Image (cartoon, rainbow, N blue to C red):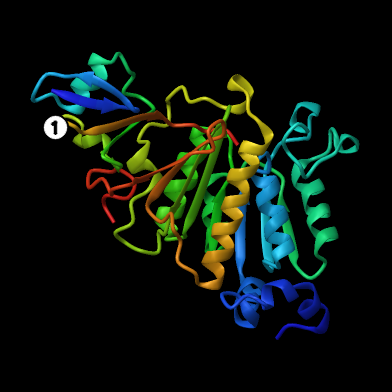
Amino acid sequence: MKIHVNEQTIELAENTNIEQLLTHLDKPFIGSAVAVNQDIISRSHWANTIINEGDKISLFQAIAGG
Amino acid sequence: MLNDDELLRYSRHLLLEDVGETGQQALKNAKVLIIGMGGLGSPASLYLAAAGVGHIVLNDFDHIEVSNLQRQISYQSDDIGEAKVEVAKRKLQQINPEIKVRSINKAMPEMQLTMELIMADLVLDCTDNMASRQLINKACVDAKVPLIVGAAIRFEGQLMFFDHSETDSPCYHCLFPSSEEQTLNCSNAGIIGPVVGTIGTLQALEAIKYFVGLPSGIKNKLKLFDGKSLDWQTFTINKDPKCTVCGQH
């Protein structure tokens, strides 16, 4: 199925959860935030949140500067 | 009641239906704690002082270095070596002698932060590291004090507002649960002055809106700013029922 990650379209297997997506993309778990269709998914829900066809995933890092 | 000097000073606020004399009086009565007086805290505090926020507490433990001056607009070359909060306090009083400014020139231990929160209506997190951000978030959740968080790095900014007086509010920890992460900061990744200035300015705007009773457009939202495209992205922050900071409340 096709999904969008930070505006890029990628091919992803059905029934992939967020943890698996991050591993697939080689992204760190620590310091990352993930939103599915503009809704941020709490870290504790990554494993049970299944990504659907056409979902828009936003991945970004915590920044602390000021 | 506003005195004659104040009526003149704030005349452009008084013209605004959303502020008026009632809003200006609310600003005068307001107590804000600004933690971190760098690139975010500089513009945030300058605007809040100018706007007439009556009680401003500034907290930082840093001294001014030459590398700060590229973005920390409260300071000038003559100030190098001086404590940031002392210089900033002087500057704010010069801008507006009608307000009270207090400075705390040290890293506040948790107990002192808790005491300060008893006296604060609102906190601006303008710090530059994740450990402080987590500590401030927890203290604000416990004290039920609203928190406006700003952060910036390179050409990117992040802005969010949590109203911890509401029990179902999510918190910063729901969004970023780890304090030990290798987060980017200004000294290791670089920062463009107007990007951090934009975020600090918007923290001041949200604070003014909060004090005059206007709803925030960013409550429980994360705003991401891209300083290259000038695009904003908006995300909804959901309360994590398993959050170790706000989940038990």
Q: Point out residue A63 in the picture as x, y percentages from the top left corner.
A: 49, 31
Residue at image x 35%, y 40%? B175
Q: Position of residue B166 (x, y in %)?
A: 35, 63
Element type where label 1 sits in the image: loop
Between A57 and B173, the residue placed more toward the observer is A57
Residue A30 falls in image quadrant:
top left
Q: Position of residue B163 (x, y in %)?
A: 42, 59
Residue B96 makes an appearance in the image:
yes
**Mark 1 sits on what residue?**
A52
Mark 1 crowdedness (10 Å alpha carbons): few <14, some 14-19, many ≥20: some
Residue B38 placement, left or right of A6: right
**Mark 1: which amino acid?**
Asn
Instruction: Specify the subunit that label 1 lies on.
Output: A
Residue lying furthest left: A15
User: How many labels were placed on the picture?
Assistant: 1
Residue drawn at 61 percent across, 65 percent down? B31
Can you see residue B108? Answer: no
Judging depth in this view, the residue of B103 and A37 nearest the camera is A37
Q: In this rendered view, identify the residue nearer to me: A46 or B62.
A: A46
Quadrant of the image containing the N terminus of chain B: bottom right
Residue drawn 75% across the image and 47% down it: B85
